[in-house]
Amino acid sequence: MAHVIPILRIFDYDKAREFYMTWLGFRIEWEHRPEGSPAYLQIARGDITLHLSEHSGDCSPGARVFIDDFQELYAFHRQLEVKDYKYNKPSIVTPSYDPTAMEMTVTDPFSNRLTFVERQ
């Protein structure tokens, strides 16, 4: 089975680590970061895998990743609130496209958005 991995543009490795690893709880699976060169890394949280790239030709900032069938969204939201990341205060909403779903969107420091959706 094919596996799709979105590539998100980042501009600052340390800010990306703070957002994705420290706040959202992703872990680095591998990274390619030669001295003096842009970073490229794979991160994961459960079944979610993303690539982050400082390379300008890989992608553009401002992407949106839709993460469907996320489990325990309310618990994840509470974990994020406790960490008190000063640049993001996400809320959970019921999207107009599905009244049985709950949705939370976070925006990284590079204007990429991750939308987590839990369906009942």
Image (spheres, rainbow, N blue to C red):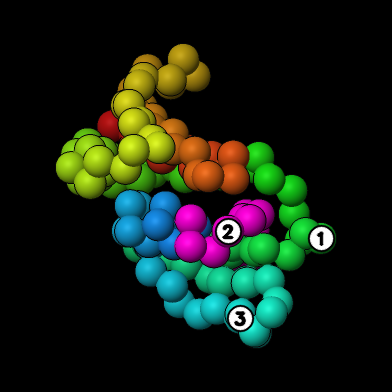
Residue hosting label 2: 12
Residue hosting label 1: 57
Q: Residue furthest right?
A: 57
Q: Distance between the residues labelled 1 and 2?
A: 16 Å
Q: Decide if residue 102 is on the left or right side of residue 17.
A: left
Among numbered discs 1 and 2, the one appearing first in the sequence: 2
Secondary structure beneath label 2: loop
Q: Is residue 102 above or below residue 67?
A: above
For this rendering, which residue is in front, 7 or 61? Answer: 61
Q: Decide if residue 86 is on the left or right side of residue 32.
A: left
Among numbered discs 3 and 1, the one appearing first in the sequence: 3
Q: Position of residue 25 (x, y in %)?
A: 32, 58
Res 72 seen here = no
Residue hosting label 3: 32
Q: Where is residue 50 in the image (x, y as percent from the top left)?
A: 53, 61
Q: Which residue is drawn at 38% across and 61% down?
A: 21
Name the amino acid type tagged 1.
Gly
For this rendering, which residue is in front, 8 or 86? Answer: 86
Secondary structure beneath label 1: loop
For this rendering, which residue is in front, 73 or 22? Answer: 22
Among numbered discs 2 and 3, the one appearing first in the sequence: 2
| Residue 63 highlighted magenta (yes or no) | no
